[in-house]
Amino acid sequence: TAARTPPRISSTGLAARAAVVLRDNDTGTLVTASPRLYPHMWSWDAAFIAVGLAHLDVGRAVAELDTLLDAQWRDGMIPHIVFTGATDYFPGPDRWGTDAAPQRPRHVRTSGICQPAVHAIAVHRIVNVARRTSAADAELARRFAERAWPGLYRWHRWLVRHRLPDPSGLVTIVHGWESGMDNSPRWDLPYAAVRPGPDLPPYVRLDLAGVGHPGERPSDDEYDRYLWLVEQMRRAGYRPDEVVRTSDFLVGDVFGTALFALACDVLAKLGDDLGQNRAEIAALRAWSARARAAVAASCRPGTGLARDRDVRADRWLDAETLAGFAPLLCGGAGTRVEARLLDLLDGPRWAGHPALLAAVPPSVSPHSPDFDARRYWRGPQWPVLAWLLGWAFERRGWSQRAAGLREQGLRLVSDGSFGEYYEPFTGEPLGSTRQSWTAAVVLDWLC
Ligand code: 2M8
């Protein structure tokens, strides 16, 4: 496919279309992650979606996060999917089988795993957006932050209690889905050790019908492993420590750890402003410091790229993915390592690759043998990640870089299809179109 020639739509037109996407995907109480491929609420999608909604209606943004927090498990976990009644997604609630877990919420069905802890970041952003819109919105957002704070604290505490089993101090995941980067090369080695048993119940994939070509999605082999891990957790009754003890997949997620460090900082600061419990605020600061140190300690000598850790196999993982830049999000690795990482990010292996349509770092370096320009988390560019990097860079005082990511991110999405991800050289939208979190970050970039 030939590269397209952006931009085609004016900023006002693009923002208007983004608003329509969010409105069309809105069921009333939640905005589905996309119209066809993902007809439910996803945990980290909901956070980004709420940020986008804040530009349209602060009350609706707050309601989105209320819906998510209403589905929080009694032990503190925020589940990765909150199911609507839609039946055209697999695995749905019956396959997850969480109904038997005593700590599940009663009024809604959910999956039994989690996703990155970006929610405090969204609350912080919504509070700031609302301050700009009106005094009434500011008050609405403040009251929401006050009522959401204890639940968010309990969510972070759940991660600390149950997901720090490794001396590396990295926040640990029991499924690639928990990272949000499902089939990233980051997880190839740990997944190679997951061997689905003969008793894996049969299933039919429904995701392939939602995309243009199967080459844009994970493979069948990968799906067998995804479903096998679900089976293991179901058998462990979703008891968090039992799941960690029995899962064939147990990996320290360096990107998720950097996000956790950031989210703890943001939540602590919000807690100060709102006069929340001082011991809990102090705990958040300590968790953040520990997570930041764990990210820094993972850095590979030489490039400085941060690494995930295969806890089961007791080894570091060296795939060359965007997650390697985790220390730039949360800091703590020192100025020399950061300078090296920034050079690398700007250079030809990453955002400075001369053939990219937009200078947005792809999910995997085009120079890596693992790179696949069209397959999901194995190479395409993800607008939502460009937003996340930009948000973190702004916070670190790198406004110029944040502005660059915004400009290039907008270039990427300028066709107005709101692709889930994009082919880096041609700008072709891939996966789902009208993807809610893409529309949401576009609104935040433009408003
Ligand atoms: C993708 O993941 C789901 C499973 O959770 C799927 O492929 O079925 C990922 O991109 C994930 O990060 C995202 O939250 C979800 C919904 O957009 O889709």
Image (cartoon, grey):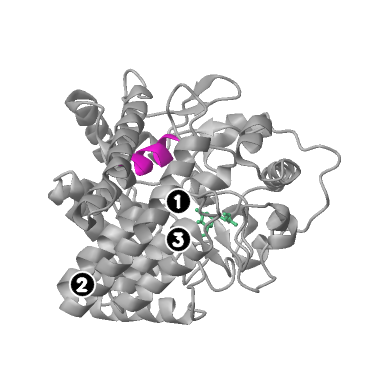
239 or 202: nearer the viewer = 239
- Mark 2 highlights which residue? 138
> Where residue 360 sits in the image (x, y, percent)?
31, 51
- Measure how far apart labels 1 and 2 are at the Cα level: 37 Å
Q: x, y (%) of residue 302? A: 31, 19
Image mark for residue 404: none
Magenta region: which residues?
253-261
Disc with the residue nearer the chain's start (3 vs 1): 3
According to the picture, the residue beneath numbered tag 3 turns out to be 45
Residue at position x 69%, y 43% from top?
233
Q: Quadrant of the C terminus?
A: bottom left
Tell me the distance, in whole angstroms, between the alpha carbons under discs 2 and 3: 23 Å
Report the front residue among 279 and 337. 279
Q: Which marked residue is nearer to the observer: mark 2 or mark 3?
A: 2
**Circle 3 Cα neighbour tier, 10 Å, few/some/many (<14 / 14–19 / ≥20):** many
Q: Residue 380 — which label?
A: 1
Which tag is nearer the camera, tag 3 or tag 1?
Answer: 3
On whether ligand 1 comes within 8 Å of the CB at mark 3, the answer is yes
Q: Classify the position of ligand 1 by quadrant: top left, top right, bottom left or bottom right.
A: bottom right
Residue 156, above or below 316 = below
Residue 132 horizontal/vertical position (percent)? 16, 72
